[in-house]
Image (cartoon, rainbow, N blue to C red):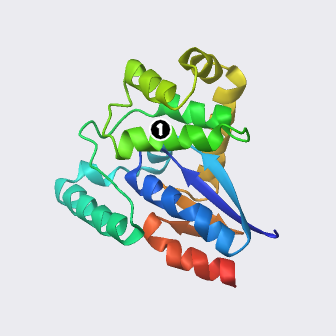
Amino acid sequence: MSKTLEFFFDVGSPASYLAWTQLPALAAKYEAQLVYRPMLLGAVFQATGNSSPATVPAKGAYSRQDFQRFAKRYGVTLNHNPYFPINTLMLMRGATAYLGTADFDRYLQAVFTAMWVDEQDMGQPEVVAAALQKAGFDPAEVLQRVQDPVVKEQLKTTTGEAIERGVFGAPTIFVGEQMFFGQDRLDFVAEALAG
């Protein structure tokens, strides 16, 4: 696989969730390596002066409708989480901690599902613990991993790299040096992979 598809994401982003449901199949179709790049969206917003569409009521309402259109197109469930926006620092440290392990996909599945299908308050440690335990994780082990200074530093490093490369929101996808922002740009991602 010579082609690489980098996926900068934060689990607190419904658009990241939608992209996540589609990217594995897209990468497989074009024989590209899907590289997950967990980043902290709040830090990206702070560094770039950007903010969530939810901060503008009309834009937030439109975005929710648009996300539903894409969820229907993709054949996936997306529910509006009543606790949105959620502080995802610990969740993204968890994604960083499990990156490159056999448990990474299961971790993302558990967190994205709890957040965007089951509408759980994933900013609450006890809710996170229950969701991860249901997925077969030991919450104590997860907590230990997210406290690891190496994991904390790796998340900072990846977030810093995203900002340096021009990322201002999530999801952001790179095919080589070509950058694509938003889950609604997957057709352009496919064209880049095909080219």
Q: Secondary structure at mark 1?
A: helix
- The amino acid at mark 1 is Val
| Relative image position of residue 77 (x, y in whole percent) | 35, 56
At 52% from the left and 56% from the top, the residue drawn is 20
- Residue plotted at (64% across, 65% down): 174
Residue 121 in which image quadrant: top left
The front one of 124 and 104 is: 104
Q: Residue 146 at what x, y percent from top left? A: 60, 23
- The foreground one among 8 and 27 is 27
Q: In the rendered view, tell whether residue 170 sits above or below residue 65.
A: above
Question: Residue farthest to the right?
Answer: 2
Q: Residue at x 59, y 22 (%)?
A: 142
Q: Are there few (<14), some (14-19), or many (20+) residues within 10 Å of tag 1?
A: many
Tell me where residue 116 appears, x and y as whole percent. 36, 46
Name the residue carrying label 1: 111
Q: Seen in the image, is 56 located left or right of residue 11?
A: left
Q: Residue furthest bottom?
A: 195
